[in-house]
Image (cartoon, rainbow, N blue to C red):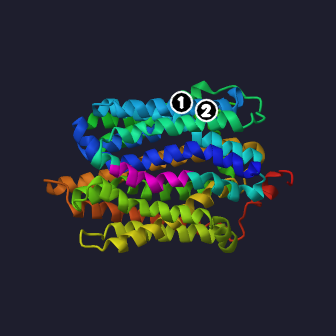
Amino acid sequence: MSALRLTPLILAVALFMENMDSTVIATSLAAIAHDIGTEPIALKLALTTYMVALAIFIPVSSWMADKFGAKRVFAWAIVVFILGSVCCAISNSLLTFVLSRFLQGMGGAMMTPVARLVLVRVTPRQQLVDAMAWLSIPGLVGPIVGPPIGGFITTFASWHWIFLINVPIGILGIILVNKYLPEWHRNEPRKLDFTGFLLAGLCFAGLVFGISVLTLPALPAGFGYGSLFLGVVAAIAYWFHFRRTEYPLLDLRIFRQPLFRLTMIGGTIFRLGTGAMPFLFPLMLQLAFGLNPFESGMVTFASAVGAFTMKFMAERFIARLGFRRALVIACTITAGGVLAMGLYTPDTPTPLMLALLVITGFFQSLFWTTTNAFIFADVADKDAGQANVLSQVSVQLSLAFGVAIGGGIFEGVHLLHGGAPGLNDFHVAFWAMATVTLISALIFLRVPRSANMHSHRAESGAPAE
């Protein structure tokens, strides 16, 4: 097997573990909440904490890869993720579970970004879509098998085992990385912007935690407002710090590139709309439809089947449609899929739900594959590391805000009538999320029709391949 195939497949072992973990937990939230003595909706704090950890530590992933070597950093990231998984399994309260998810996020922050950075550096731009697809394909097996496996384990055994299964998978990943992957050439690392790291971390944690608390009545609102204030102050401080620092942690000057800027804005809005979907949909199936975790997992896995199928067709779709049409179509159909979730009832035929979930996952995957490559369209090779870091930070923060906002809408509607959460509460949340998702399609209409992966050559002066 060629290096262009072997490298992404080995790197994808970690992505498989990470993606399976995120989908496994979605089907088990109700059971976990019951055991640790909290409400299912409160566990959105654990989901957002994981994403905040990713956003905090992703910016230093490129520096660490250059400083210590991508191979070594990647292997140790898997070790940290395994430790976090074990801690999740032995958690007995919301606090310990949240802290364990943060530890998992620290490991995850070094896995996916380092894998993508390696591919960007070793893959010719015209082959980047294909390489990204090969990186994603094994990782997508996780979301396919995750919900059924997680539901089965939770229903017939114990939810603790959904985290412990990461141990053998992670050990396999470490063995493959150390045995088969060579040590790539690494750039001389520039000085780490430690002040920027602290300010950015405070900003991300403050903003996301603040929004989560304000949409989570179980905690005093004062904590939420205080956290938001800290996040805003840190953001302002980082802006002034960035402008007078030669090598800032997050170099915001890259937003001057129009295609990069458009992709970031449109992608952020898309993820705000869809971020809570994997969180709320399994809860709706269990709390409003009366399904057990295994039955819920046997429904929700369908979207991953659609996503997996798209990965084999993404390059041809993009070549035929162009980046602009691919993004607009993907956002529009995904919005329709989210809207459909707001129409499901216990009487909705399961085959119909499965079919719509496959279609939604198919086009949601088209969005991810397209933006993963298009984010580099007008970025010079020397700025690829910063583009990678900024895009990954944006992904995690927007998903975290999406979970917080979607869960907040659900909780707000629920509080209006009191009592137990009802089906209508979920429906209103999905309608709001679909509206936000549709806005992203309007953003991508501004992408030039002729835009492609060679756009950066003319604007950045990068040499031809």
Under mark 1, the amino acid is Val
Tell me if I can see residue 230 in this picture: no
Please provide the residue range marked out in magenta: 139-152
Q: Does dot 1 land on a helix, a strand or a loop?
A: helix
Find residue 200 and report its horizontal and vertical position in percent.
53, 34
Q: Nearer the viewer, residue 445 or 12?
A: 12
Q: Answer few, some or many: residues within 10 Å of disc 2's Cα (few below 14, many 20 plus, some between 14 and 19).
A: many
Q: Residue at x 53, y 37 (%)?
A: 170
State whether the magenta stretch is mostly helix, strand or loop. Answer: helix
Q: Dot 1 corresponds to which residue?
A: 79
Within 10 Å of the Cα at label 1, are there few (<14), some (14-19), or many (20+) other Cα atoms?
A: some
Residue, far left: 419
Q: For residue 311, say whether it is visible.
A: yes
Amino acid marked by disc 2: Ala
- x, y percent for residue 344: 30, 69
Q: Contact, CB < 8 Å: mark 2 with mark 1? A: yes
Residue 352 left/right relative to 384: left
The residue labelled by disc 2 is 75
Q: How many marks?
A: 2
* Residue 181, horizontal then vertical, whole percent: 71, 38
Q: Quadrant of the C terminus?
A: bottom right
Depth check, front residue: 223 or 183 = 183
- Residue at point 27%, 31% (across, down): 93
Q: Which element is circle 2 on?
A: helix
Residue 377 part of the magenta segment = no
Above or below, comparing residue 438 to residue 392 in the picture: below
* Mark pair 2, 1: CA separation: 7 Å
